[in-house]
Image (cartoon, rainbow, N blue to C red):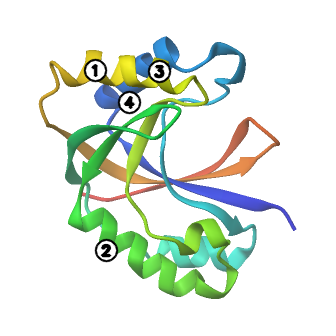
Amino acid sequence: MSSLILTARIDSENQVFFDKMRQQHFPKEINLLKAHLTLFHKLPDAPETYEILEQVLEKPFEATISEIKSIGRGVAYFLSSPELLQIRSSLKHKFQAQLSLQDQQGYRPHITIQNKVKPEDAKQLLQEIASSFEPFKIVIEGLDLWYYLDGPWKHATHLPFWS
């Protein structure tokens, strides 16, 4: 059975910003995706998955991009959002039996703009960006499911939050 990736959809203005940062700083030869905020890396591609996700009845909500951090061989924007953590915790409980080891671990929501580079290159980018960084707000507008295609992803469905 194939699996699905679950991401949180952010508002279009901030999506453009993160996509631009990723295009500028992610190695071009392996940059197969737009910037994304992953909630789960491997959910079952089954009707039950869609049924569970359709029960996430939320209004769009704000999250704060609170810091930029090194992820070893890259850089990511980390965010603070009690609402997003609550959604993920609830879904983690519902999918517990099907979760991968990666998805069972602790969760720190982030958007990666650089990865798989030399540590010194990541450190340099972090210093450049951090010098002018100020926390800012994004809006979480819904959820997206994706098929993993051994590198690229194919969009499966969008589950919007309703205002």
Q: Which mark is residue 86?
A: 2
Q: Residues within 10 Å of mark 1 (few under 14, many from 20)?
A: some
Q: Would you say residue 83 is visible in this rendering?
A: yes
- In the rendered view, tell whether residue 28 sits above or below residue 73: above
Q: Which mark is residue 120?
A: 3
Mark 1 highlights which residue?
A: 127
Cα separation, mark 2 vs mark 4, equals: 22 Å
Res 34 → quadrant = top right
Classify the position of the N terminus by image quarter.
bottom right
> Looking at the picture, how far across and down is residue 135, in whole percent?
14, 36
- Amino acid found under the numbered disc labelled 3: Glu
Q: Would you say residue 16 is visible in this rendering?
A: no
Cα separation, mark 4 vs mark 3, equals: 27 Å
Res 162 → quadrant = bottom left
Q: Secondary structure at mark 4?
A: helix
Counting residues from the start of the chain, the first of labels 2 and 4 encountered is: 4
Q: For the residues carrying marks 3 and 1, which lies nearer the camera in this image?
A: 3
Q: Which residue is at 37% across, 71% downward?
A: 87
Q: Which residue is at 41% across, 81% downward?
A: 90
